[in-house]
Image (cartoon, helix red, strand yellow):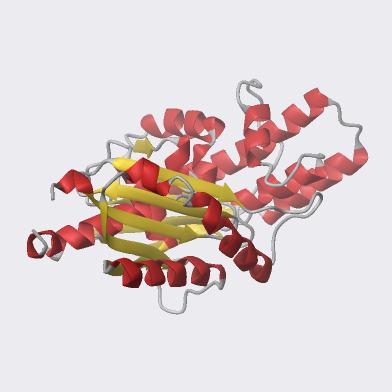
Amino acid sequence: MSLENKIILGIDTSCYTTSIAAINLGGDVLLNKKIQLKVKEGNKGLRQSEGLFQHVGNFGELFEDFKSRTGESQIVAVCASKTPRPQEGSYMPVFNAGYNFAKAISQIVGAQFYETSHQEGHIKAAQFCSNLKADRFLAVHISGGTTEILISAKNGAGFDVSLVGGSKDISAGQLLDRVGVRLGYPFPAGRVIDQNAYGYGDEKCIFKISSKDGHMNLSGVETQAYRIIESEKFDDNKKRQLSYHVLKAISEKLKKSIIYLGGKYGCNDVLFAGGVASSRFLNSEISRDLSTKGIKTYWSRPEYSADNAAGVALIGRDIYIKNGDEKNEA
């Protein structure tokens, strides 16, 4: 059987998305599907138990066209994200849904089974569709639950990561979602905030964020934004303006932190991963200003920035090849 007919199945069940992906040993993405978990109107998130329940219910829909998309291909390995981060003690119940479902599939079809972390999957997916070739780089993981700046070094199929900066309180994604909900947008609101801000104009940021040595606090912006929302009447233009300044504040502090940490750790390559990394506003602002400092930025396509299982499948593919399993089954 050729490499194109042997596939790796990747499964990821994060806090807000159920994802599956199928990649053949030749590196072609045959399938990359996801279902966003449902959040009740006006709410700002989900309990872990609610997320776990929805993940279980989503698998049937995600696998409906699996056979038609993959044809006669054979699943030779299944890889799942078991933890949020590649660190001891990292745990969230929602990942149990995908992990145990993946393990069951591997046993039924007689495939190899591997595990990785959600964060490594994000980094792998982002690197996959960018031009980043370096084995050591700064990885900026900005999502609904995370705003972290990491020293990332390739380690086999995955990555060794060391946390060196980021937000000490709420994440950038939480800030965007919470302000967006206050403005009347449905959760998650990051995409609408980005649409509002992109192309708005060029104004000096009205918010101040405390930051030091690559670390920042974002909850102060949330408080300031709430005060503005409560004290003024908001039409569409006002919403665009506030969206601009919230994203501008995130951009300014990320740039300052990246410049500091890049110099400290000797990294001039920066990879952006996570759902918030699909922001056109942040891409434009950060890339433009960091390029003047000799820092190269790498961004992936939105479908590989937001939660997805493609990176998990790619890690599984690399493990399978590295272990020589494809030779053993030839």
Q: Is residue 261 visible?
A: no
Residue 324 appears left or right of 60: left
Going 40% across and 37% down the picture, which residue do you hit? 299
Q: Is residue 237 visible?
A: yes
The answer to which image quadrant residue 272 occupies is top left
Q: Position of residue 235 (x, y in %)?
A: 86, 26
Q: Position of residue 171 (x, y in %)?
A: 60, 55
In the image, 64 versus 224, the foreground residue is 64
Q: Position of residue 151 (x, y in %)?
A: 34, 57
**How many numbered discs?**
0
Going 80% across and 28% down the picture, which residue do you hit? 238
Position above or below: 185 against 157: above
Q: Position of residue 77 (x, y in %)?
A: 27, 62
Going 81% across and 50% down the picture, which residue do you hit? 42
Going 85% across and 46% down the picture, which residue do you hit? 227
Residue 225 appears left or right of 34: right
In the image, 49 versus 266, the foreground residue is 49
Residue 84 appears left or right of 211: left
